[in-house]
Amino acid sequence: MTAPRRARAQQVTLALSVVLAVALGAIVYFAVTSLPYLATSPSTDPHFGALNACVLAALPERVGFAVSRDASRVTAFSPGRLVECAGTPPQATVHERAGVTLAAYDATGALWTATAAGLWQLGAAGWVERGHAGVSALVGAAFGVVALEADGTLVALKADGSVSATRALPSSREVKLATNADGALVALWGGGRLTIVNSVTLESTRAEVGCAVRNVWWRPEPPLFLADCGDLTFEVHALTSESALMPARARSTATLSGPGGLYVTPCDALPCTTETVR
């Protein structure tokens, strides 16, 4: 082979090597970036996959969601529309509802939503206004919902919309709410403080944690919850305040959906299941 031909052959070999290297790099990149997404994709979730796929088909963009307490229905909402998926196979019901900021199901299965103007409840005859403007947090409970208003007023509403109790909190800023497995108790925490209240009377239980609480998880056993204080995590009995130090481990941000014991974490503004919080 002449020198010019050898030079051209070397150039071709070098060019092919570069192309193969780029192709291999692209394959590795897409494998690394795509597989984790697929593993946590809402439509592949072992429990909510079909429900999430139903929502995705009807509402491509979402800002929030709610899961019924029996985990059989999913509602998601955008600034102008709300979609509920239920059934086998899941079917979508679309509601043209503007301005929804929060949603929750009570134990009767009724869907509640909050807008800047107030609370709304979906019944057999359609949407019913329940008042209470400026709700900053909302959770479903055993006999209705518990809502936290922007001025720090905590309100317990029954399934018929009547108010069973109110309570003034020092502040509503960054306060989070979570209902226990049977919906009888609600945890309120924020700014290091923690209070457990009855979901109907809003009276505090005896539960206390002697440290600044950062996060709370209800356990499937109704009276028990975990309180994370950063370096320490305690399991606490909500009625007696008996507590035990828990092993140090990473715990995902998740919410107990209801009596079925499923823990839900957000993925792409839809529910995905996560491991039981221990």
Image (tube, helix red, strand yellow):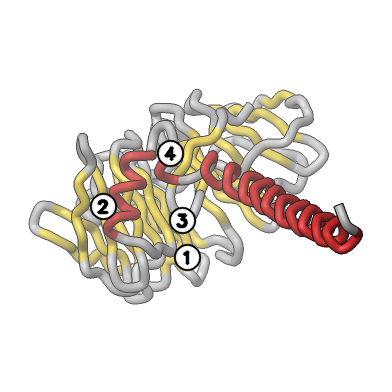
Question: Mark 3 and mark 4 in contact (Cβ < 8 Å)?
Answer: no
Q: Earlier in the sequence, mark 3 or mark 1?
A: 1
Residue named by callout 3:
269
In front: label 4 or label 1: 4
Residue type (three-letter) at the residue carrying disc 3? Ala
Would residue 214 appear left or right of 54 to someone viewing this image? right
Residue type (three-letter) at the residue carrying disc 2? Glu
Residue named by callout 4:
44
> How many residues crowd around disc 1 within 10 Å: few (fewer than 14), some, or many (20 or more)?
many
Secondary structure category for the residue under label 3: loop
Q: Residue furthest front?
A: 2
Could you tell me which quadrant the C terminus lies in? top right
Residue named by callout 1:
136
Q: Nearer the viewer, residue 42 or 235?
A: 42
Q: Earlier in the sequence, mark 4 or mark 1?
A: 4
Residue type (three-letter) at the residue carrying disc 1? Ser
Q: Nearer the viewer, residue 143 or 15?
A: 15
Question: Mark 1 and mark 4 in contact (Cβ < 8 Å)?
Answer: no
Q: Quadrant of residue 155?
A: bottom left
- From mark 2 to mark 1, how far is it between C-alphas? 22 Å
